[in-house]
Image: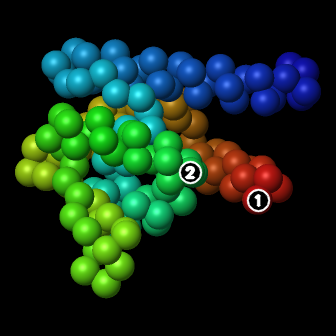
Amino acid sequence: MDINSSISMLSHIHSQAADFLISRLKERGLPDFASSHGNILFQLCKNGSMPMGDLARAINRDKSTTTVLVRKLEKEGLVCSESDKEDKRSKILSLTKKGQEYTEVTKSISQELISTFYKGFSEEEKEQFTSYLERINTNFN
């Protein structure tokens, strides 16, 4: 394998993972969202309510893009927002009951994705691979 093709391979794997998630969501009759929508739901599930700016940083998007993504999730009834009591210019986002139910379904899909991703890997290989990815990520930060 040509080591210079690593970035291309990562891009291809990213696309395959996104296709995997979209197909599993469709199988379960769930809305067709972009991976960024799923990441928003994941972050809100993990962190509870979050200010829009913190969410934007967590999903690595600018505030205007995050706002557009959140509006779609609000329209679907998965996310709600309210003005920050301390800073009226800021919105605090959280999952609705429907959003919490959605994340329960996506947890099982995520586990299926992770199992597929690491099929045939030992625990040591998984840890080593993750370590390499963290180093690459640090190189770009």
Q: CA distance from mark 2 to mark 1?
A: 16 Å
Q: Which of these two is toward me, 100 or 115? A: 100
Q: How many marks?
A: 2
Identify the residue shown where x is 22% and y is 49%: 79
Residue under the point 37% across and 56% down? 43
Position of residue 125 measured from the top left corner of the image (x, y, whole percent): 64, 45
Residue at x 56%, y 51% (from the top left corner): 62
What residue occupies the far bottom of the structure in this picture? Answer: 86
Circle 2 residues within 10 Å: few <14, some 14–19, many ≥20:
few
Circle 1: is it few (<14), some (14-19), or many (20+) Cα within 10 Å? few
**Mark 2 lies on residue:** 62
Report which residue position mark 1 lands on.
141
Quadrant in which the C terminus is drawn: bottom right
Q: Residue at x 52, y 35 (%)?
A: 118
Residue 127: x and y in percent read 61, 53
Give whichever of 48, 69 is nearer the camera. Answer: 69
- Residue type at the position of mark 1: Asn
Q: Amino acid at mark 2?
A: Asp
**As drawn, 33 above or below 78:** above
Viewer-nearest of labels 2 and 1? 2
